Image (cartoon, rainbow, N blue to C red):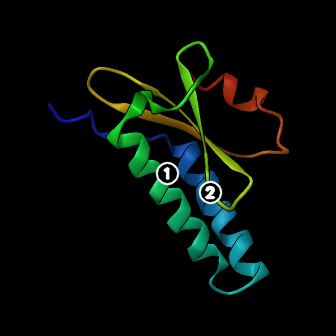
Amino acid sequence: MSPPPLSLRAQARAEIQEAFEWYEDQRPGLGREFLAAVRARLADIEEAPARYSKVRGEVRRALVDRFPYSIFYFAEPDETVVLACFHGKRDPRHWHKRR
């Protein structure tokens, strides 16, 4: 049986895009490296949604390699939903309301 498909909420997509643009402004190519790291972690989440620890209720957190970002998500029987992609210094209460 294959794992459920991954879906990203609009806010999560916007956060990833914003971080990509910021990193790309810092150094050309760094934004692409950030996207590659995020995509790799999203692939891990999609492959095995229960791999990462729960941090609030059913919401889990996966750290992005090389970058100070976390991906917050929850798994349903028919899909895995990405709520947020947050910088480690950001107040996590902002994503709590998204569920």
Say whether marks 2 and 1 touch (CB < 8 Å): yes
Q: Residue at x 26, y 25 (%)?
A: 78
Q: Which residue is mark 1?
A: 41
Q: Is residue 3 left or right of residue 85?
A: left
Image location (x, y in percent) of residue 12: 57, 45
Image location (x, y in percent) of residue 5: 28, 39
- Report the front residue among 78 and 67: 67
Image location (x, y in percent) of residue 56: 64, 17
Q: Which residue is mark 2?
A: 65
Image location (x, y in percent) of residue 60: 56, 27
How far apart marks 2 and 1 lie (CA) works out to 8 Å
Q: Residue at x 64, y 52 (%)?
A: 15
Q: Secondary structure at mark 2?
A: loop
Q: Mark 2: which amino acid?
A: Asp
Residue at the far left in the pictured view: 1
Q: Secondary structure at mark 1?
A: helix
Position of 90 relative to 61 (above/below): below
Residue at the far top in the pictured view: 57
Q: Residue at x 49, y 40 (%)?
A: 9
Q: Is residue 44 left or right of residue 78?
A: right
Q: Mark 1: which amino acid?
A: Arg
Position of 58 relative to 69 (above/below): above
Q: Quadrant of the N terminus?
A: top left
Q: Residue at x 59, y 12 (%)?
A: 57
- The answer to which of marks 2 and 1 sits earlier in the sequence is 1
Disc 1 residue crowd, few under 14, some 14–19, many 20+, Cα 10 Å: some
Number of numbered discs overlaid on the protein picture: 2
The image quadrant that residue 11 belongs to is: top right
Q: Quadrant of the C terminus?
A: top right
